[in-house]
Image (cartoon, coloured by chain):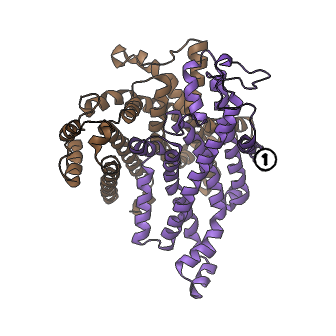
């Protein structure tokens, strides 16, 4: 196990290095002179020179890359050109919205999908199963941001149970903040829950057909006992992988959903960054997103190996 | 019965929107580029079956033209994924276990860490938003998907007797991949292609919704939803119809994908 973790850790570091090189190349090398790009066509040469100085664009490409990465390792993400504040502070404030939203949706999706998938598998071919399969087929086809708009239409505009958007901030208290995140989290969770419920169903069905379940039944366990003691743990392996993969979809989805609800999260930060050509912000936020996806994938791999010893041998 | 029936329902749904997209080249109920402010935000009636938007444009006509954008972006993105991903996957399988295989698969993992939204953000930050950049972003995202399917499908085939026979006959890895492996994984690729097509429609809608896709005046479903958002309490139909167009198209494609998998993929047939 220790050896497996070390190899995976080395490949994690390599992925992060290559990803940072790709992002750096796209943002800082392709546009030619980022300072001139950020200021636009009509910029004064002096202003461009000043910004170049300010952004630390005077050194060679290799020096700039190293200082960017070195800065990130010490928590220095550079200074936003439009906001004139350290990007790290901006990102931290926005993450306080996006990350709880993503996790809220992940918990909702998992809490709904696993029981629903198991119920469908238990009553395979019966009404409950058909209803679950039909609903999830529809759930997969619904774009989360459109579902969010429909939720706003029903629960905010017509029923007035939730507000249509905005975020009171965590300083307004835990429950008001969670309430503001509830509609967005439901909208995010629905398509992912649909996928997860289907994966759970087919995974449980597959394990139920295995020989060791027949053995367990033959030695006198009831169907329910066989499922709980033997089938569930095995069935959860593919389900866990999907949950891990869903983290990245939910994070990306959160960035889009924030636009529907006018939430001050990473999404609004990055889209403003794009329109205002604030490359420092875009570069750092993209790196952060890719970083979190790579780290979560790594954690899922490790958890996977912890559950299933057969996987440790594949380096 | 259930398999074929859902396949036909799906094909009918997807076919309907493909037909609407094609029809829009020669005919739409109204000219979608004409702004008639006096007739703005009309609810559905006899003249405008799905109503009009905030500029008085006919929603049905815009949905028909928008179908063009969605379908074109998704198809080309699937094409990029197949054209680049399948040869990579076949090449990796032909050199299975070697460092080339390792390199290709690690590269795949790396692209997987970039969701299509993030790729679109990167491209747009430097080149500005456009439908072409949306195609690129979704296409790049599709590459590792097809590479994995191709490699996964090809690996077991390399141990079969007819491949061995071909090797004994002196055929090289490239010829075997093209003549013996590819035809045998075509079914899997078709099924995956249908799934990526429907994901592409969803991704295009999301990208154009946040302004990273097709730019106005080109109608696109995501753009229509973004425009409708501020008027959703006054004119909900502006948000409902383009959304339903996305749902029906994606639902149709998913049903086709599931149905094709049941028919074409022997592993699924056995599992049932």
Q: Quadrant of residue A153?
A: top right
In terms of depth relative to the viewer, which is nearer, B256 or A212? Answer: B256
Residue bearing the label numbered 1:
B8
In terms of depth relative to the viewer, which is nearer, A1 or B259? Answer: B259
Q: Is residue A231 above or below residue A309?
A: above
SS assignment at label 1 = helix
Q: Is residue B259 above or below residue B20?
A: below
Q: Is residue B159 left or right of residue A314?
A: right
State which chain disc 1 sits on.
B
Find chain A in the image and tell me its colour: brown
Q: Residue at the top extreme? A: A160
- Percent of width and height locating residue A28: 30, 47
Q: Is residue B243 above or below residue B105?
A: above
Can residue A137 be seen by looking at this rendering?
A: no
- For image coordinates 36% across by 15% down, the residue present is A173
- Percent of width and height locating residue B65: 67, 38
Can residue B108 be seen by looking at this rendering?
A: yes
Q: Is residue B81 left or right of residue B28?
A: left
- For image coordinates 29% across by 38% down, the residue present is A280
Find chain B in the image and tell me its colour: purple
- Percent of width and height locating residue B233: 60, 15
In terms of depth relative to the viewer, which is nearer, B97 or B80? Answer: B80
- Percent of width and height locating residue B270: 70, 59
Q: Quadrant of residue B23?
A: top right
How many marks the image carries: the answer is 1
């Amino acid at each position: 196990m220790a050896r497996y973790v070390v190899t995976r850790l080395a490949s994690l570091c390599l992925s992060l290095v290559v990803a940072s090189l790709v992002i750096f190349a796209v943002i800082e090398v392709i546009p030619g002179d980022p300072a001139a790009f950020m200021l636009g066509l009509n910029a004064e040469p002096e202003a461009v020179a000043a910004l170049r100085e300010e952004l630390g664009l005077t050194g060679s490409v290799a020096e700039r890359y190293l200082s960017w990465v070195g800065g990130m390792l010490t928590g220095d993400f550079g200074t936003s050109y439009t906001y004139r504040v350290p990007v790290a502070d901006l990102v931290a404030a926005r993450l306080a919205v996006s990350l709880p939203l993503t996790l809220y949706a992940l918990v909702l999706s998992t809490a709904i999908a696993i029981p629903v998938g198991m119920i469908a598998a238990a009553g395979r071919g019966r009404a409950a199963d058909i209803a679950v399969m039909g609903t999830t087929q529809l759930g997969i086809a619904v774009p989360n941001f459109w579902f969010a708009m429909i939720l706003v239409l029903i629960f905010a505009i017509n029923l007035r149970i939730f507000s249509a958007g905005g975020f009171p901030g965590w300083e307004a208290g835990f429950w008001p903040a969670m309430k503001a995140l509830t509609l967005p989290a439901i909208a995010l969770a629905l398509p992912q829950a649909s996928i997860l419920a289907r994966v759970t169903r087919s995974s449980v069905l597959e394990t139920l057909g295995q020989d060791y379940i027949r053995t367990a039944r033959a030695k006198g366990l009831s169907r329910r006992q066989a499922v709980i003691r033997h089938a569930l743990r095995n069935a959860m392996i593919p389900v866990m992988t999907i949950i891990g993969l869903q983290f990245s979809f939910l994070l990306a989805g959160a960035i889009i959903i924030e636009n529907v609800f006018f939430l001050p999260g990473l999404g609004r930060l990055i889209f403003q960054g794009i329109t205002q050509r604030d490359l420092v912000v875009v570069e750092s936020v993209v790196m952060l997103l890719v970083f979190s996806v790579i780290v979560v994938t790594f954690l899922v791999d490790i958890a996977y190996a912890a559950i299933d010893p057969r996987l440790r041998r594949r380096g | 019965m259930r398999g074929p029936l859902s396949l036909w329902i799906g094909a009918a749904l997807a076919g309907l929107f493909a037909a609407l997209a094609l029809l829009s080249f020669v005919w739409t109920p109204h000219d979608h580029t004409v702004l008639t402010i006096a007739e703005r935000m009309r609810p559905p009636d006899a003249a405008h079956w799905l109503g009009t938007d905030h500029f008085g444009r006919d929603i049905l006509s815009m949905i028909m033209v928008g179908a063009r954008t969605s379908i074109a972006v998704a198809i080309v993105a699937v094409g990029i994924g197949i054209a680049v991903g399948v040869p990579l996957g076949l090449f990796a399988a032909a050199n299975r276990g070697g460092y080339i295989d390792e390199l290709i698969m690690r590269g795949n993992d790396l692209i997987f860490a970039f969701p299509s939204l993030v790729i679109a953000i990167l491209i747009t930050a430097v080149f500005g938003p456009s439908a072409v950049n949306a195609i690129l972003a979704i296409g790049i995202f599709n590459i590792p998907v097809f590479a994995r399917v191709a490699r996964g499908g090809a690996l077991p085939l390399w141990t079969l007797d007819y491949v061995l026979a071909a090797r004994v006959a002196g055929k090289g890895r490239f010829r075997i991949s093209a003549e013996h492996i590819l035809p045998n994984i075509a079914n899997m690729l078709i099924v995956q292609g249908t799934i990526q097509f429907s994901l592409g429609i969803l991704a295009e809608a999301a990208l154009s919704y946040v302004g990273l896709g097709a730019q106005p005046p080109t109608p696109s479903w995501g753009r229509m939803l973004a425009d409708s958002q501020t008027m959703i309490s006054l004119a909900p139909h502006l948000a409902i119809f383009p959304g339903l167009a996305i749902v029906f198209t994606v639902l149709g494609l998913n049903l086709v994908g599931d149905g094709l998998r049941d028919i074409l993929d022997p592993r699924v047939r056995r599992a049932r």
